[in-house]
Image: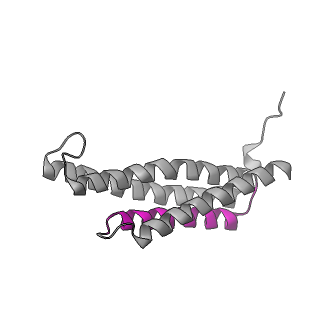
């Protein structure tokens, strides 16, 4: 039977770093979902996009963020819980947040695929790769 883990043993600064990036990510998600709601209200569309490109783009921008942010934050939280430094957690959190902001901005660019959108995805992928490596390595340390 596994031994109970003392929660106070976790690296406090790393967990605080996760909290910062989770909080900022929640604000980003709130901004994106409010944009969808405002478009729905002004266009009088309750389901789908009603054929309105602006609503489709706003919905997909939020949808894409909600697909990537939660699993990214879960991975970063596990990195912190395995004892990696607050600096590493901040680097991962900042890259994920910046990536999602760049992606959201790029989604609203007239010319697609936009540079911001591509850079946002690259940063997100790098966070996922780095987190996966840290989690796997951390298990064996």
Can residue 10 be seen from the camera position used here?
Answer: no
Residue at the image point whose x is 23% and y is 57% from the top: 54
Query: x and y percent of residue 11 in the render?
Result: 73, 56
Query: x and y percent of residue 121 in the render?
Result: 50, 62
Residue at the image point whose x is 47% and y is 48% from the top: 67
Magenta span contains residue 116: no
Q: Is residue 14 left or right of residue 38?
A: right
Residue at the image point whose x is 23% and y is 55% from the top: 53
Query: Principal SS element in the magenta part?
Result: helix
Magenta span contains residue 100: yes
Picture colour scheme: one colour
Residue at the image point whose x is 23% and y is 46% from the top: 49
Q: In the orientation shown, which residue stands out farthest toward the top?
A: 1
Viewer-proximal residue, 31 or 124? 124
The quadrant in which the N terminus is found is top right
Q: Which residues are magenta?
A: 83-109
User: Looking at the image, is 47 positioned above or below residue 96?
Assistant: above
């Amino acid at each position: 039977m596994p031994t109970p883990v003392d929660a106070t043993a976790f690296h406090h600064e790393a967990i605080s770093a996760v909290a910062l990036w989770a909080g900022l990510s929640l604000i980003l998600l709130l901004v994106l979902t409010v944009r969808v709601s405002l478009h729905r209200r002004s266009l009088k569309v309750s389901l789908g996009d009603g054929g309105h490109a602006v609503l489709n783009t706003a919905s997909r921008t939020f949808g894409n963020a909600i697909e990537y942010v939660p699993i990214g934050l879960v991975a970063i939280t596990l990195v912190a819980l395995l004892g990696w430094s607050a600096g590493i957690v901040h680097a991962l959190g900042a890259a994920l947040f910046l990536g999602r902001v760049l992606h959201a901005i790029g989604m609203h660019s007239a010319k697609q695929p936009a540079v911001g959108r591509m850079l946002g995805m690259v940063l997100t992928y790098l966070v996922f790769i780095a987190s996966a490596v840290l989690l796997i390595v951390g298990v064996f340390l």
